[in-house]
Image (cartoon, helix red, strand yellow):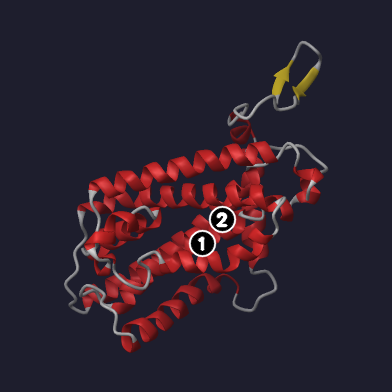
Amino acid sequence: MKKDSNSGWDLLIEPKKGLFDINLGDIWRYRDLILLFVKRDFVVLYKQTILGPLWYLIQPIFTTFVFTMVFGKMAKLSTDGIPPFLFYMSGTIAWNYFASSLNGTSNTFINNASIFGKVYFPRLVIPISTVIINMAQFLIQLILFLLVYIYYISAGFDMQLTMWLVGIPFALLQMACLGLGVGILISSFTTKYRDLVFLMTFGVQLWMYATPVVYPASMIPKEYLTLYMLNPMVSIIETFRIAFLGQGTLEVGYYIQSWAITIFILIVGILSFHKVERSFMDTV
C-alpha cells in the first residue's frame, strides 16, 4: 500500500508481487490499529469474570505452587540451591509469556478469517498485537516475581543480581520474536493442515519439558548439552535465572546461537505468513 497523489486517491493498494515483497512500513502506519486490538483484548480477556485481572497473578502463583510440591517436594529435583518457589516462578512466568504468544498467534488465519475477508490491513497486525498484550501480562507477573524475590532477600536468603540483568530486555524481545515467529509459521500451515491445531495442544507442553522450567539446565549431561542448547528457550530461561538468582547454565556462545535460531525462525515465519496471506481465503 502506498500514497498516490497523482491519481487523486489517498492510498493505492496493490497486489503482492513476490515472496519478498513485504512492506514493514505498513505495520508502523497501522500502529493505531495495533493499539486498538491490544486495548480490546486486554478488556475482553477477563470480561464478565469475578476476579478479573487478578487471574494474571493467580495463574503463576498456583502453577508455581503445584510445581514446587510435585517437582520440588515429591520428585526432589535439584534447584541449584535456589529457593524452590522462586526457581519455579522464574521459569513459569517466562515460559507463560512464550507459550501464550505462541498459542495466541498460531491460529491467526483461522480465527480472523471473517475480518481478513472484508477489509484490508496488514495481516501481521493481529499476531503482533497478540504478542504485545501477552507482554503486558508478563510485566504484571514480573512485578509479582520481584515482590516474592524481595521477600526472600529480606528473609536472609543469599541471592545477588548479576550483570546478566542488562540482558533481561533482550530476553524479553527474544521471547516476543520467537513466539511470533513460531506462531505465524504454524498459522501459515494450519490453513491447509488442521492437524497442527491438535498438535499444538500437546506440542507446547512437550516443548516446556524440553526447557529448564521445572529443572535446572545443570542436570543435562555434558554430552547432550550442545544439542539441548539448540532450543532457544533454554538460553532465555537461564538468562532470567542468572540475572535474578545468580545460578544458571549459559555461555556467550550459546546465547548468540539462541538469537541466531530465533531470528532465522522469525524470518521464515514472516515469509511463510506473507506467502499464505495472499491465498488463504481459498482454503480456510
Relative horizontal placement of residue 272, taking residue 59 as reference (left or right): right
Q: Residues within 10 Å of mark 1 (few under 14, many from 20)?
A: many
Q: Residue at x 53, y 51 (%)?
A: 182
Q: Residues within 10 Å of mark 2 (few under 14, many from 20)?
A: many
Q: Position of residue 78 (x, y in %)?
A: 25, 77
Which residue is labeled 2 in the image? 133
User: Total of numbered circles in the picture?
Assistant: 2
Q: Residue furthest front?
A: 223
Q: Position of residue 95 (x, y in %)?
A: 44, 63
Q: Nearer the viewer, residue 131 or 196?
A: 196
Above-or-below relation of 135 to 202: above
Q: Nearer the viewer, residue 83 or 150?
A: 83
Q: Earlier in the sequence, mark 1 or mark 2?
A: 1
Dot 1 amino acid type: Ala
Q: From where the camera sits, is residue 173 visible?
A: yes
Q: Position of residue 238 (x, y in %)?
A: 30, 60
Q: Residue at x 31, y 73 (%)?
A: 86
Q: Residue at x 34, y 71 (%)?
A: 147
Q: Nearer the viewer, residue 108 or 260?
A: 260
Element type where label 2 sits in the image: helix
Q: Which mark is residue 99?
A: 1
Element type where label 1 sits in the image: helix
Label 1 to label 2, Cα distance in Å?
A: 13 Å
Q: From where the camera sits, is residue 141 visible?
A: no
Dot 2 amino acid type: Ile
